[in-house]
């Protein structure tokens, strides 16, 4: 049975159309796979630390854990996409497997929930500063509800693409995504996945900046002003994290705008997803650098081992 199936598979592959492969495809595919594996490893490590370390069991760290979980899901989806593209490029074939459309759906869904996870972090800081007495809005239950709502929204909004057969296999880029053109679904997807959460995060940041400046002009207790400035600093860090995604996701936005007027470059998805994979990796590194409890917990575990060894030797 095994030999028969291998023969049938070999015949099937030979009958597939031969794809035009550029010399830079394979190195780019490998680089994308390495980046997505790093994202998966880092997000898994961060999630593990947050779960096992009791000092990380706070509402802000729960929101950080949500971002790590969304990064893990996004990394897995991107790794599946990269592996599929790499396989087809390596075998020089044009082939749409049975999971191609599902893979496209998960890419749009996971990247949206990742962006909304940063919006939830900014929203929490905004509530603690502007409405410090509304304890229910800062509670575990309310924040958990918001997390669930963002996940539900991210899973529902791309269903319209499937029902309207908008996911199309792009032979040149070996991917199933929305074909970039001036259409309702491209604009709708861009708004849901990118524009709305980014604009809301920027709006929250500028509202907090104005609030802090207003507090500085009037007599305010030092401890309250310090707390507000600390929360503003955390939102500023979130802005930096989001900026990494925005800047390196800029080529995708440029290709969308180009598609409204003319045909985008032939390999636009390959270029765009290379930048997205790199931005995800840099975002995870920045998340570690900016999350003090997570950073302290990991550094504590790194420093414990030499001390234990030294104590054992003496």
Image (cartoon, helix red, strand yellow):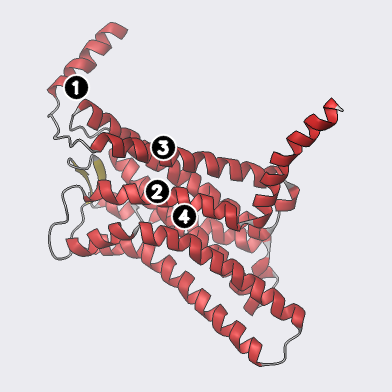
Which disc, if any, is residue 114? 4
Q: What is the C-alpha distance between the residues marked 3 and 1?
A: 27 Å
Q: Are marks 3 and 1 in contact (CB under 8 Å)?
A: no
Which of discs 4 and 2 lies nearer the camera? The answer is 2
Q: Earlier in the sequence, mark 3 or mark 2?
A: 3
Q: Earlier in the sequence, mark 4 or mark 1?
A: 1
Q: Is residue 193 visible?
A: no
Q: Tell me which corner region of the image, top left, top right, bottom left or bottom right, holds residue 313.
A: top right
Task: Please give the residue where the numbered disc 1 appears in the rendered image.
Answer: 13
Task: Please give the residue where the numbered disc 2 appears in the rendered image.
Answer: 278
Q: Residues within 10 Å of mark 3 (few under 14, many from 20)?
A: some
Q: Earlier in the sequence, mark 3 or mark 1?
A: 1
| x then y, percent, for residue 23 | 20, 35
Residue name at image x 18 percent, y 61 percent? 259
User: In the structure shown, which secondary structural element does the residue marked by tag 3 occupy?
Assistant: helix
Question: Quadrant where the C terminus lies?
Answer: top right
């Amino acid at each position: 049975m095994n030999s028969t199936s291998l023969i049938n598979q070999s015949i099937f592959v030979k009958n597939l159309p031969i794809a035009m492969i550029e010399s830079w495809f394979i190195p780019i595919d490998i680089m994308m796979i390495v980046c997505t594996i790093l994202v998966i490893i880092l997000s898994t490590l961060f999630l593990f630390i947050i779960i096992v370390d009791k000092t990380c069991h706070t509402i802000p760290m729960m929101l950080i854990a949500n971002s790590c979980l969304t990064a893990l899901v996004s990394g897995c989806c991107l790794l599946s996409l990269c592996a599929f593209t790499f396989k087809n490029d390596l075998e020089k074939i044009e082939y749409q497997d049975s999971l191609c459309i599902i893979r496209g759906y998960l890419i749009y869904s996971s990247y949206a929930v990742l962006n909304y996870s940063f919006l939830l972090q900014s929203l929490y800081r905004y509530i603690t500063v502007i409405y410090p007495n509304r304890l229910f809005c800062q509670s575990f239950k309310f924040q958990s509800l918001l997390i669930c709502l963002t996940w539900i929204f991210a899973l529902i909004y791309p269903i319209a693409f499937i029902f309207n057969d908008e996911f199309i296999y792009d032979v040149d880029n070996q991917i199933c995504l929305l074909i970039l053109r001036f259409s309702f679904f491209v604009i709708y997807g861009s708004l849901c996945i990118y524009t709305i959460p980014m604009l809301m995060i920027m709006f929250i940041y500028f509202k907090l900046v104005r609030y802090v400046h207003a507090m500085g002009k009037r007599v305010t207790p030092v401890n309250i002003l310090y707390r507000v400035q600390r929360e503003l600093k955390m939102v500023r860090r979130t802005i930096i994290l989001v900026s990494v995604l925005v800047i390196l996701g800029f080529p995708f936005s440029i290709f969308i705008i180009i598609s409204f007027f003319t045909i985008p470059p032939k390999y636009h998805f390959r270029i765009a997803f290379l930048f997205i994979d790199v931005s995800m990796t840099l975002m995870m590194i920045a998340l570690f650098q900016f999350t003090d409890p997570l950073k302290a917990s990991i550094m504590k575990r790194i420093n414990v081992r030499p001390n234990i060894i030294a104590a054992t030797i003496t």
